[in-house]
Image: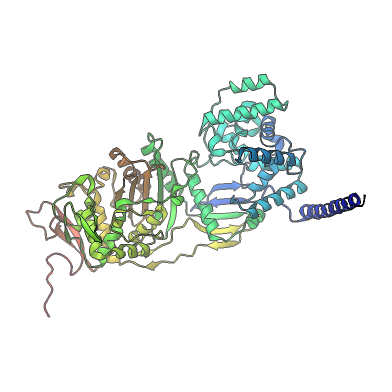
Amino acid sequence: MKKIYLICKIAIALMIIFCVFYTILFLCAKYGSQIDIENSNSIYMYDKDGKTFYEGNNGTKKWIKLKDISKHLINATIYSEDKNFYEHNGFDIPRIIKSTLVNIKSKDLKEGASTITQQYARNLFLTFDKTWERKIKEAWYAFKLETQYSKDEILEGYLNTINYGNGILGIENAALYYFNKSAKDLTLAESSMLAGIPKSPNNYSPLNDEKAAKKRQKQILQSMVNNGVISQKEMNDVLNVKLTYYGKKENLNLSTIMYYQDAVIRELESLKIVSDDSIRQEGLKIYTSLDVNAQTKLEESIKNNLEKKDEMQVSAIMMDPNNGEIIALAGGKDYSKSQYNRAIQSKRQVGSTMKPILYYAALENGLTAATTFLSKPTTFSLGNGLTYSPSNYADIYPNDKITMALAIAYSDNIYAIKTHFFLGEETLVKYAKKMGIKSKLEANASLPLGTNELSIKEFVTSYATLANTGYSVNAHLIKKVEDGSGNVIYKYNEKKEQILNKSYTYILSELLSNTYDTTLTSYTAPTCASIAPRLTKKYAVKSGTTDYDLWTIGYNPDIVVGVWTGYDDNRKLSSTEYKYAKNIWADAIENYLREKEQSWYEKPDNVIGVLTDAETGKIATNESKLKKILYYVKGTEPGYKRKNN
C-alpha cells in the first residue's frame, strides 16, 4: 500500500512539474517576441540597377488571404500533409509515434510526421541544415506559432510561403505560374496537382516529371476520398482531366536565375553577417551584381546550343574582371529540373585551360612568344623508374620545333610539358595560387594539362587577373546588405593589388587572341578556329578538353566568360560534343557585347611588336609561311642585339 501511495505521490509531483513547466513555456511563447508571419524572413534581392529580381519566402507580393484560396486547394493540402491540423497543438503525437514505429520496422526513414505548423516553422529559417540545434529551434517556433496565431492564420502563412518548385514560392505565384490563374479559381484537378508538389518540389513538379506528379496527385485524391472530402467518382473524373500548364513567370522568366539567387544565399551564409533570428525579425535587402541582360544572354546561349542535348549539363560565369563582380551565373541548364549548382558546388578537371597560367609564368621567367621547343611523341623520365608519355590531340605533331605562339594557338601538350619541366613543377602551383586558385594543386608532371579539379568560380577569377592587366580580384555576387530598416550591415570592400606584370599580361592576351586566328593554320588548326565566324571582336580565349570535361574561358577588358559542359555521371565525351562549350562561350560573350564598342588593351611602353615567323621564332621574311606580329618586352625580341659597353 505504501508503495502504491509513493508512486501516486511521484506521479502527482511529476504532473505538477509538467504543468508548471508547460505554463511557463506557454507564457513565454504567447507573450514573448511576436512572429510577424506576413513580414518575417523577407529577403529581397536587387540587381545592379537596383531593380528587384527576387522576393523570397515572405517577401512575395502575391500574399493572399485564406478566404481567397480555392477550398479544393486547402482541402488537398490539409489531407495530404496534415489531416489533424485543426485538432493538434502543432505536434501530432499519435502520428509521430506511428511514423517512428513504421520507420523502425522498415529500417528506413520512409515516413515523416511533420505537421503543417512544423513545416511552416521550418520555412522561417534561411537554411535547412539538419542539426539538433536547428530542430529544437523549429520546434520552439512551431509552438510559438500555435500560441500566437489561429489555425487559419498559420495555414494562410504556410500556403503563402511553401515551395511549389521551379523557384515558385506561395500558392498565388504557383497558380499563376502553372495555370495562369488566381489561387481562388483553381479547380479540384489543378489543386490536387499543386498540393502534391511541396512534398518534393523537384520530383513532383508536373513540368519536371508529369508521370511522378500524376502519381502523387492520385495519392492526394485517394486521401481526400478516404476522409470523405470527395467521392470516388469525383476522384476518377479528376484523374481523367488533361491539365495544360502555363509555365511562365510574371517577370524574369529565366530558368537559370535561381542558380544566381542560390549562389547569393550561399555567399550570404559564408559572410556570417546575419543570423536567422535577425532575418526573421527584420528581413534583408541584398544588393547584387546581377546584370539581367547578361543573365538573359547567357541563358539564351545555353538553350540554343544544348537544346537537343537532354542530359548534357553546363556551368557558366560572366564576371567583370575589373572588380570581380559576377554579373551572370548558371549552375545548370534549368533550375526547375536540377537544383545542383555546378557553378559553385562542382569541381572538374580543367584540361588545357590551365595552360595560360603556365605561359604567364614562362613569360615572367625569361621565355618569349618566340621561344621554341621540339614537339614530337615524347616519353619523359620522372625518376625512380617512372615515366610520363603525354600526347597531342589526335596524335598530331609537327615533329619539329615550334614557338610558344603556335603552341598556345594549337594547344600543344608536348610544348606545355617541356615548359613545365623547364620552369620546375612547383612554379605552376605558385602562380596558380597567386592568381586566385584556392583548391589544392599537386605539383606533378600532368598539372599543365589540367588534371587537377577546380571550380569554375575560382578558375574564372584566375583569368580575371589576366583580363585586368594583373590585379587580384575577389569573385563576389553581393555588393551591399541592408536590414529591413535600411541600415547597411555589410558593404563589399574592394581591394585590388597588382600581382602580375602588366607587360606580360598584355603579351599573353595577344597570344591567346591567336587561338581563333585561321591564318595560323598549318599542320593543324588553332583550337578555337571553329568559332572564328561567330566572333566580331577581339578576345583572349582558351579551350580545354578532357575525356569528361569541355571548357572555354576567355576575356577582353570588359568581361570574362567561363563555360563548362559535360555530364554529371562523368560519362566519356565524343568528339562531336567538343563544340558545345566553345559555341556557348562565343554566343554569350558576343551577344552581351553586341551593342558595345571594340575594347582591347593599350600596349605598354616597354613592349614592342615584331613581325615574326610564327614557326621558327625569327624575324619574318618573304619566305615565311606563317607571319604574325608577336609582342615582346623590349630587349627580348628576335634580332635584338645588345650594345656592348
Q: Nearer the viewer, residue 398 or 96?
A: 96
State left or right for residue 495 relative to residue 448: right
Task: Give residue 644's position: percent from left, percent from top.
Answer: 11, 78
Q: Residue at x 24, y 45 (%)?
A: 529
Position of residue 583 measured from the top left corner of the image (x, y, whole percent): 32, 43
Compared to residue 381, the image places residue 240 above or below, namely above
Q: Horizontally, is 233 left or right of 422 in the view?
A: right
Q: Look at the image and tell me in which quarter the C terminus lies.
A: bottom left
Q: Nearer the viewer, residue 62 or 160?
A: 160
Please provide percent x and percent y for residue 502: 30, 66
Where, by quadrant of the figure, is residue 320 drawn?
bottom left
* Closer to the camera in the image, 301 or 100: 100
Q: Is residue 77 above or below residue 402?
A: above
Q: Is residue 227 left or right of residue 171?
A: right
Q: Judge whether residue 66 can be spotted in this image.
A: yes
Count of residue discs:
0
Q: Position of residue 194 (x, y in %)?
A: 60, 33
Q: Point out the residue furthest to the left here.
A: 623
The coloring applied to the image is: rainbow
Q: Residue furthest right?
A: 1
Q: Residue at x 12, y 60 (%)?
A: 618
Q: Residue at x 40, y 48 (%)?
A: 316
Q: Is residue 561 left or right of residue 268?
A: left
Visible residue check, residue 600: no
